[in-house]
Amino acid sequence: MRRNKFRVYCEFEINGKLEKCMESPASWFLLTQAGALMSYGPLEMPQPLGRKYKKAIPLFYTGLKDKGGKEICEGDIIEIDDDWESGEGERGVVRWDEKNAMFRLFCYTKYGGEGWFMPENKTWAKLKIIGNVYENLELISSVA
């Protein structure tokens, strides 16, 4: 049985202040078979997310790593090397393509265009994670 890995983007309130963070599932989260996100703490039973969570989004691991060995997850912003074969894009976002049931790279080109690209498994290892859409959206806004 394959083990699904994920991390969680969270927004929650502490003392009236909105906090944002990226958490690994081992920290405080469990994803049920039905897709519900549960939280837990040391020596606690998993429970539905409390009201303190304004947002909690699971981001799944693609099963691939970038050239630095970092695990590539849904929502990651990928930088494409200049010597890359297509020469089309500079940056892209890893997204789940529901229609084709696969992770793909949604690229933003130098010329203002955008579109899907599916790198081969060996090509992903030539790419570099530079951020994610929840914490570093400006990295895409500057290209698109």
Image (cartoon, rainbow, N blue to C red):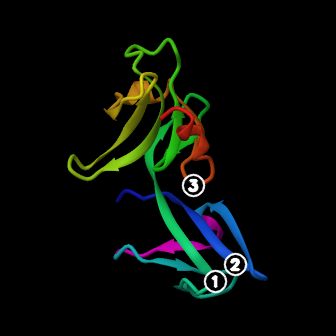
Mark 3 and mark 2: Cα distance apart in space: 17 Å
**Crowd band around label 3 with a 10 angstrom C-alpha radius: few (<14), some (14–19), many (20+):** some
Q: Give the range drawn in magenta.
A: 26-33
| SS at badge 3 | loop
Please report the residue visible at 60 percent of the width from the left and 67 percent of the height from the top. Answer: 10
Position of residue 6 relative to residue 108, above or below, is: below
**Crowd band around label 1 with a 10 angstrom C-alpha radius: few (<14), some (14–19), many (20+):** few
Q: Position of residue 96 (x, y in %)?
A: 35, 50
Q: Position of residue 91 (x, y in %)?
A: 50, 31
Query: The residue under label 1 is which amino acid type?
Result: Lys
Residue 32 lies in magenta, yes or no?
yes
Residue 84 lies in magenta, yes or no?
no
**Crowd band around label 2 with a 10 angstrom C-alpha radius: few (<14), some (14–19), many (20+):** few
The residue labelled by disc 1 is 52
Residues 124 and 85: in front is 85
Mark 3 and mark 1: Cα distance apart in space: 19 Å
Q: Quadrant of residue 70?
A: top right
Query: The residue under label 3 is which amino acid type?
Result: Tyr
| SS at badge 1 | loop
Query: The residue under label 2 is which amino acid type?
Result: Glu
The residue positioned farthest toward the front in the image shown: 112
- Marks 1 & 2, CB-CB < 8 Å contact: yes
The residue labelled by disc 2 is 13
The residue labelled by disc 3 is 134
Please report the residue visible at 50 percent of the width from the left and 58 percent of the height from the top. Answer: 6
The residue positioned farthest toward the left in the image shown: 99
Q: Earlier in the sequence, mark 1 or mark 2?
A: 2
Position of residue 131 relative to residue 35, above or below, is: above
Q: Quadrant of the N terminus?
A: bottom left
